[in-house]
Image (cartoon, grey):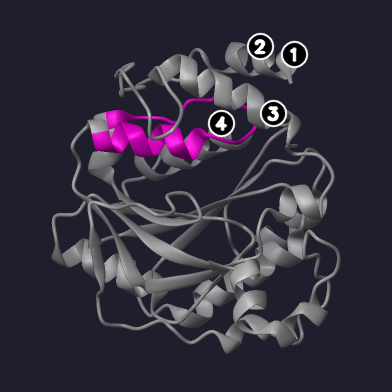
Amino acid sequence: MSKTLIGFVTFGNLPFTQLTVNSIKETTRNEIDFVGVVGKPGDVATLNWLDSVGIPSICHTENFGFPYSLNDIYDYAWKSNDYDNLIIVGNDIVAYPYAIDSLIDYANSTDYLVISALQYDVKNLVRDFPETRGYFTEKTFKITDFSSRCWELFKHYSDKPDVADMRLYDIQNMCLYKKEVFKRIGYTDVNFYPAYYVDNDYAMRIIYAKMKCCTLVNARFFHFWSRTIHQETGGSSNNYFENNRKYYKLKWGGDFGKETRNPGIVMDNRDYELGAIQNWKRQG
């Protein structure tokens, strides 16, 4: 039997994290473990809740950003422990039935190294079910009352594998990585501080490494859409988006989908990280 770790990063917004974890527990039959990175300094509420439900936590004393937090999870999964699979999930998602199990079962039965699920976000929900718009406020779709569980109107998921070969639609909101991925391309690039374009960069490194990957179209999850920005203060902001886009273009020789060079895909140490973070903080 393979060992699978579910890893997530938080920056406040405990009710969303609780919903994420509980939805995974409720819909998954495979044996799984969890680890959470608490990225918001002083977030005692999240730390206490994780402790109360027996989930190990990694606590940051300042905002080190999302890529740095992902690297903490990699270390926990593959240096401190020996998991076969790591599934990175966002902390503002809801797992639909069969989603996590489909990723694990397909990883166990095939030689795919990276397997992503397919998101269904709040904008899709309101488009497909206009009556749900009343549960959300403002253009950013804020929600504070989860009792309606309106996302459950969506039913287009299945336990039957539906494979989009060599395609990755979402690699950091619900995506499984086998240990071989870390061995071959290593850590995420913390120069994408505090977020934005780190997923594009990691996806391109997977592609350039010629790793076998796919998306399971039947494995679905609901995404509330950037709650850290839209319902929490701090963490990241749109001010960093253009900075990180410029860095991506500099690194790859073009914007996403228009890359002209391979800057090197392997990042096998973390020694550079804090200096890089401080540099991008100043620019942000």
Measuring 35% from the left and 83% from the top, which residue is drawn there?
Answer: 158
Tell me whether the residue at label 1 lies in contact with that at label 2, contact meaning CB atoms closer than 8 angstroms: yes
Q: Does the magenta stretch include residue 21?
A: no
Where is mark 4, residue-wise? 68
Measuring 31% from the left and 66% from the top, which residue is drawn there?
Answer: 216
The mark nearer the N terminus, 1 or 3, is: 3
**Of discs 1 and 3, which sits in the foreground?**
3
Measuring 34% from the left and 69% from the top, which residue is drawn there?
Answer: 217
Tell me whether the residue at label 1 lies in contact with that at label 3, contact meaning CB atoms closer than 8 angstroms: no
Mark 4 to mark 3: distance in Å? Answer: 16 Å
Mark 2 Cα-neighbour bin, 10 Å: few <14, some 14–19, many ≥20: few
**Of discs 4 and 1, which sits in the foreground?**
1
Where is mark 2, residue-wise? 279
Tell me whether the residue at label 2 lies in contact with that at label 4, contact meaning CB atoms closer than 8 angstroms: no
Mark 3 to mark 2: distance in Å? Answer: 13 Å
Mark 4 to mark 1: distance in Å? Answer: 17 Å
Where is residue 5 shown, x and y percent of the image?
41, 56
Q: Quadrant of residue 169?
A: bottom left
Q: Is residue 129 visible?
A: yes
Q: Describe the element under mark 4 as helix, strand or loop.
A: helix
Q: How many numbered tags mark residues here?
A: 4
Mark 4 Cα-neighbour bin, 10 Å: few <14, some 14–19, many ≥20: many
Q: Describe the element under mark 3 as helix, strand or loop.
A: helix
Mark 2 to mark 4: distance in Å? Answer: 14 Å
Residues shaded magenta = 185-207
Q: Describe the element under mark 2 as helix, strand or loop.
A: helix
Position of 256 compared to 84: left or right? right
Where is mark 1, residue-wise? 282
Where is mark 3, residue-wise? 240
The mark nearer the N terminus, 4 or 3, is: 4
Q: What residue type is labelled 1?
A: Arg
